[in-house]
Image: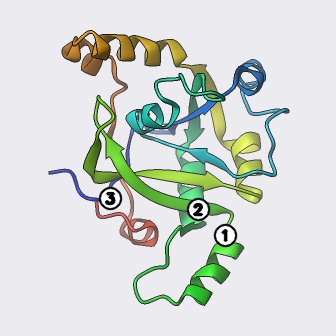
Amino acid sequence: MTPPRQIRAHYDADTITVYQAYDPAIAEPALAAQTFVPPFKRERMTWIKPSFLWMMYRCGWAAKPGQTRVLAVSITRDGFEWALANSCLSKPAEGETADAWRKRMDASPVRIQWDPERDLHLNRLDHRSIQIGLSAEAVDRYTGQWITAIIDVTELAHQIADHREADRTDQARQALPTEHPYPLVPDLAHHIGATA
């Protein structure tokens, strides 16, 4: 059984892959610069997602307006863990007052949400996937320090969608990026509400 709230991602000893989907007007300059540059707006919260299938759910296999280019963004694990350590959950912690939570959220540059994970057909699963919202200092660190590579995986998204629609489920599943449970020290897991 998959734990209710667990980070699953494609990662190695130094980096972790997160996904974002944008219009070509943002994606093309980002690919060229290998970081996010205008017209990307640093003053807005930007959401990164380690789950490929949750990204597919969000962007409709790269078919939704404004999300037709899917980017796999490799970032340092140090940066990723800084984001988690400097985050606030999108809901109050158990026993926390709404006022205390709002103050904590206002002071944090990172927001954490746990949303239902999706299967290959984008059906809702019982366990959850993490979404990480970066703002203020976190966006500056993301664009200026953490990113090690940006790859366009739009064609991969289309290929998997085509396999799925043609009932080639095995081919679709084999083409998915490999994701494993991401190791967290206990204090960090507790801070973000992870259950494994």
Q: Tell me which label, 3 or 2, sits earlier in the chain.
A: 3
Of 137 and 157, nearer the camera is: 157
> Relative to 153, does residue 135 appear above or below in the rendering?
below
Separation of residues labelled 3 and 2 (CA atoms): 15 Å
Q: Which residue is mark 1?
A: 108
Separation of residues labelled 1 and 3 (CA atoms): 21 Å
Q: How many marks?
A: 3
- At label 1, the amino acid type is Ser
Q: Which residue is mark 2?
A: 111
Question: Quick check: marks 3 and 2 in contact, CB under 8 Å?
Answer: no
Q: Tell me which label, 1 or 3, sits earlier in the chain.
A: 3
Separation of residues labelled 1 and 2 (CA atoms): 7 Å
- At label 3, the amino acid type is Arg
Of 164 and 48, nearer the camera is: 164
> Relative to 193, does residue 145 appear above or below in the rendering?
above
Which residue is outermost to the right? 38
The local secondary structure at tag 1 comes to loop
> Relative to 148, does residue 115 appear above or below in the rendering?
below
> Relative to 56, does residue 97 appear above or below in the rendering?
below
Question: Quick check: marks 1 and 2 in contact, CB under 8 Å?
Answer: yes
Q: Which mark is residue 5?
A: 3
- At label 2, the amino acid type is Arg
